[in-house]
Image (cartoon, rainbow, N blue to C red):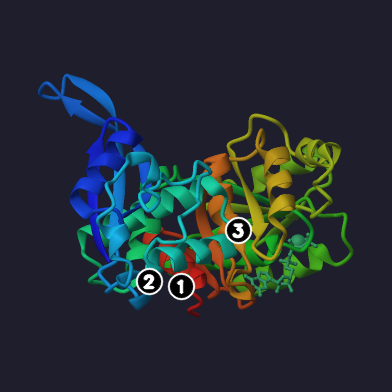
Amino acid sequence: MRMKKITVDSMPEAVAKVRQDFGDEAVILHSRPVKVRRWFGLKSVNKLEVYAGIDDAPPRKKERTRPAEAVKPVVPKEVKAVQAPEKAPGVLPASAPAPFQSISAALKAQEVNARVEEELMNRFMEKWYEEKGSRPEAAVLEDCIGEWLEARHPRAEAAPSRMIQLVGQTGVGKTTTLAKLGAREMLRRKKSIAFFTTDTFRMGAVDQLNTYASIMEAPVHVIYDQADYREAVAQSGTHDYVFIDSAGRNFLHEQTVEEAQRLLPAGEPIKTVLVLSLTAKYKDMKEVAEKFLPYISNEIIITKADETTSFGALLNIIDEFSLRVAFVTTGQEVPEDIESADNKWLAAKIAGGTLGEK
Ligand SMILES: Nc1nc2c(ncn2[C@@H]2O[C@H](COP(=O)(O)OP(=O)(O)OP(=O)(O)O)[C@@H](O)[C@H]2O)c(=O)[nH]1
Ligand SMILES: [Mg+2]
């Protein structure tokens, strides 16, 4: 398949131009509105960028035996091959080249929303066209996802915070992740750490945190109310970092979210980070994120990435809530199964999951 990118004012103009350059068998693969700078950059005009292609394979025998059709005068209305793409986002014509079809199908299988799919497909087609398909699809897709993430959240380091609280649904991995984060700071950066926990709700929750903390020889302060919190803060004044665990509840209820936030005084310099497990359904992740949005920083931690190859929900969450992934956890082992989620690492992971690589 030969491909061509043209920039035009309208779809009818694109159809005419494509027919003129490629003939009646050409298909329009994709189009997107773009702004083109004119007058030395002083003015921008709206244009349409259109990708068209034609299959170089020889026509089938049956078609060759009908010369009468080939010489038929071309009337624009009767040109069926050159068609405008469908309006719905993320829909490729059936005649699009195989790599586009397979990437589009893989993104659909990941259940990314239509906007994310369209944005990634536009990037993919542009790169594929520019590079004339010279690189493996996985490598191109990885670059596209990386650029997409970078455009949303440039690599700027998040403001460091001395006190970090993890919140999220039951069993998503808050306590385990907190232990991983604490151990990272202590082992890698030789920082002194303390743990607080407001999880007096679940039996054994304090013991679970104590087990990790005792290995790290870090103190644990159990907080039942705001007075306990003040006391714990006073006692941890010399520690570099304070990691705060919280109870997992059913946070699909707004009331539970509010209750959980009331345990710690308002206005404290605490970075509250939402923990979402990739094993959850996207609909539930989205609902929890919506409920927590007024209380959390713009960072999230994604857990249990080792238990799935579906990363669509992650892309959707980033897209819909403008949240930045700070860490991804990849197993039960403390402290090793956690990755600082830079965009390049995330892109490789998502592209690998999308195209079925482990
Ligand atoms: N496979 C896998 N399991 C994980 C990961 N992180 C945590 N877990 C497991 O998930 C289970 C729950 O982890 P916890 O840390 O207790 O979860 P939690 O959110 O604190 O749970 P609650 O306090 O009850 O709300 C444990 O069995 C962990 O070992 C991960 O990245 N991958
Ligand atoms: Mg816990």
Q: Amino acid at mark 1?
A: Gly
Viewer-proximal residue among 78 and 349: 78
Answer whether residue 152 is visible to the viewer in this image.
yes
* Residue at the limit of the structure toward the left, as seen here: 40
Task: Return the residue at label 1.
Answer: 352
Q: Is residue 190 visible?
A: no
Q: Residue at x 31, y 74 (%)?
A: 136
Picture quarter containing residue 121? bottom left
Going by the numbered disc 3, the residue's amino acid type is Glu
Q: Are marks 1 and 3 in contact (CB under 8 Å)?
A: no
Q: Position of residue 354 (x, y in %)?
A: 50, 68
On the image, the x and y values in percent for residue 43 come to 20, 19
User: What residue is shown with label 3?
Assistant: 111
**Gap in Å between the C-alphas at discs 2 and 1?**
7 Å
Q: Vertically, is 286 above or below 42?
A: below
In the rendered image, the residue lying farthest to the front is: 68
Residue that label 2 marks: 138
